[in-house]
Amino acid sequence: MVSNGNGGTMQADQTDVAGANLSRGAATSHEQSAQLKPLCVDLDGTLIRTDTLLEGLIVLLGQLRLGSVLGGLIAGAAALKARVATLAPLDPALLPYNDTMLDYIRAERAKGRRIVLTTAANETIATRIAAHLGLFDDVIASTATHNLKGAAKAEALVARFGAGGFVYAGDAGADLPVWREAAASVLVNVRRGVAGRVRVPVEHVINDRPPAAAALLRAMRPHQWVKNLLVFIPIFTADAMGSWRSWRGGILAFLAFCAVASSIYLVNDLLDLAADREHPHKRRRPFAAGTASLPAGVGLSLILLLAGAAFAWEGGILIVALAYAAISLGYSLWLKRQPLVDVFALAALYTVRLIGGGEATGHSLSLWLLAFASFLFLSLALVKRVAEVMDSATRSTNRVSGRGYGLDDLVILELFGVCSTFASSLVLALYVQYETTSGRFESPALLWCIVPLVLLWNCRMWLSTARGYMHHDPIMYAARDWVSWAIVGAMVLVVLAARAGMPLPG
């Protein structure tokens, strides 16, 4: 299979080398273009910003069809590609095309040039993409018995057009044998080391891939780490703000959950490529948009999982972190498509953070607080689902892509969520009553002010959802909402006043 050319593009250096090649053979390349020799275009990493074989394999792994993958591996590369193309067909309309390359192809086609899609991908995939774009005069691709990669592709093109009878557009080291037989080259996001080994004139250069590190960092969703601040709550509920040992455990727990969560976010995005590309906002995610390498995503996910396990081990919460990872992975693979089970799984992920924080800091949470948190997090999970269903309604789709809900479920989901909100407030009131008898506060009656503040916040979240404002995860929405911050500030003042012994008004 032709490599997709990801793995850390160095645009400035690449431009220098490609520019040198362009200057070295400027006259020749213009002459070749004038003669309108066929332009043979690679698929993976050149025409599209992804690898079709890897995407198909990820789909099969996500469907737990490991037998199909192993069977294809045993049969050989060509048979594997044919099997994956049949079992996991990709929708050409959703693939992340390189628009700059498409513009170049259209310009050359307008000159009367013959355009040939030449790829090591299976012929089924190549033919469907060519038919969708309507820009190619011919397709040369791998069959079930012949893998058209590297030297094999070069031989096929020489047999069709003769040595030096074509111009080839590619992106990776696997294309070097083809470029050796071409009249000229088109370099598409080619790395510096590969570009320096291209010995034929360079007709055109495309450098438009974003920095790989930035794309992978964005795929890790560091903005979601704010959720992991939940691990510090046990420190405050136990009045242990002055304990370095507690803060050390909390920091280790925070790092563990951040690493594990990012690892699973990467897995989730890899498994959700097709669904994300259908979504108006999620289609911009790095893997869906093709700005991040699929192999790099898999490798980074494993590294983050190991790092998270190491932090969890040091913090004494390895079992809790593994449970979090298992629930998260189960959610990505299957649970998110099961109605109601999915929201309970999301609520469990929040609650596990609290449990992990309690274990790491040495201050386990009371059953009252865990019960309150469970109802609260269930309400927030339902907020997320209701927002997604409403978003589907605005796009006139009957079902939420990749989820188990339809528009008819909206009313009952809202009912479940609002009931969970009021149940959480009731349990909070009971927890406050427990605190008023603990003897830890000088004016414990003031703590009752927290109950209406929390209820106000929850009701505001549901009102924002009903009005269509909830375009983000509810926690992220709250993190950017000044009213939410004001309510949190008011609750902190209430706790401080209760601790200081401030009397109730009147």
Image (spheres, grey):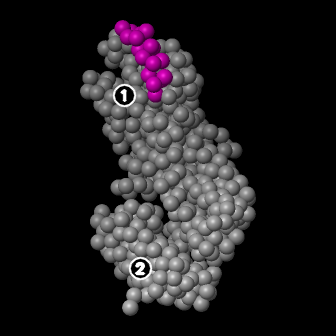
> Which of the two labelled residues, at mark 2 and mark 1, occupies the earlier sequence position?
1
The x, y position of residue 25, in whole percent, is 41, 10
User: Residue at left 63%, top 70%?
Assistant: 240
Residue 347 shown left or right of residue 34 in the figure:
right
Tag 2, which secondary structure? helix
Q: Main secondary structure of the magenta part?
A: helix
Q: Which residue, given by chain and number where applicable, does mark 2 sit on?
A: 453
User: Residue at left 67%, top 51%?
Assistant: 307
* Disc 2 residue crowd, few under 14, some 14–19, many 20+, Cα 10 Å: some
Q: Nearer the viewer, mark 2 or mark 1?
A: 2
Q: Amino acid at mark 1?
A: Ile
Q: Which residue, given by chain and number where applicable, does mark 1 sit on?
A: 115
**Quadrant location of residue 237?**
bottom right
The x, y position of residue 162, in whole percent, is 47, 16
Task: Say which of 312 and 125 sits in front.
Answer: 312
Tag 1, which secondary structure? strand
Q: Is residue 23 magenta?
A: yes
How far is the residue under mark 2 from the one under mark 1?
65 Å
Q: Is residue 468 magenta?
A: no
Please provide the residue range marked out in magenta. 11-28
* Disc 1 residue crowd, few under 14, some 14–19, many 20+, Cα 10 Å: many
The x, y position of residue 345, in whole percent, is 56, 71
Q: Is residue 185 placed above or below 374 in the rendered structure? A: above
